[in-house]
Image (cartoon, rainbow, N blue to C red):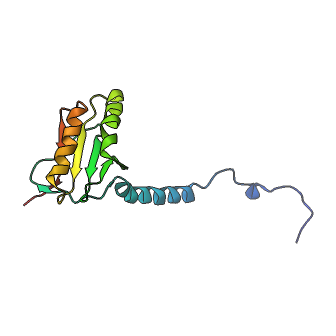
């Protein structure tokens, strides 16, 4: 029954704290989602890399990756380009970052002619060191 009192009793004061448990739950779910999807985003162009027994290179600088698909299509990072665009783009990128490492990811079934042509274009652009990306194959 209501007694007509318009005052709060000491045990009915409004709580002045924020419950952070639901926030922590949501953040953990988001963290798990990003951890699962991050490797999928860095996959890039789909090529079937050749196997090798060489060791992995550990570098802190993100390299410039040129991918060559089985049909000879060329990608600079994730963007498809034609051969005529490769030298000007490499020169522009190396103007800003002269020591950026450059790697070629050639499909295992691509003709060597395509790889050699890209390497010749990179030499024309002044690139002296090129890395060939392979998959680590352990016996």
* Residue in the image at 23% along x and 50% along y: 105
Give the x, y percent position of residue 36: 38, 60
Q: 84 or 12: nearer the eye? A: 84
Give the x, y percent position of residue 65: 28, 44
| Above/below status of 88 relative to 108 | above
Q: Residue furthest right?
A: 4
Q: How many marks?
A: 0
Left or right, 1 with respect to 87, comes to right
* Residue in the image at 22% along x and 60% along y: 48
Q: 73 or 22: nearer the eye? A: 73
Q: Is residue 133 visible?
A: no
* Residue in the image at 60% along x and 55% along y: 19
Q: Quadrant of residue 14?
A: bottom right
Give the x, y percent position of residue 47: 25, 58
Q: Is residue 130 visible?
A: yes
Left or right, 47 with respect to 54, comes to right
Q: 5 or 19: nearer the eye? A: 19
| Above/below status of 94 relative to 52 | above
Q: Residue furthest bottom?
A: 1
Q: 1 or 103: nearer the eye? A: 103
């Amino acid at each position: 029954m209501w007694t007509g009192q318009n005052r709060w009793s000491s045990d009915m004061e409004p709580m002045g704290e924020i419950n952070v448990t639901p926030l922590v739950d949501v953040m953990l779910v988001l963290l798990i989602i990003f951890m699962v999807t991050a490797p999928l985003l860095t996959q890039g162009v789909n090529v079937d890399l050749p196997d090798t027994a060489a060791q992995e290179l550990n570098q802190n600088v993100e390299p410039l990756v040129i991918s060559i698909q089985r049909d000879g299509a060329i990608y600079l990072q994730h963007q498809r380009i034609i051969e005529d665009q490769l030298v000007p783009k490499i020169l522009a990128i190396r103007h800003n970052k002269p020591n950026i490492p450059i790697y070629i990811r050639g499909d295992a079934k691509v003709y060597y002619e395509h790889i050699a042509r890209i390497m010749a274009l990179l030499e024309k652009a002044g690139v002296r060191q090129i890395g060939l990306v392979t998959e680590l194959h352990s016996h």
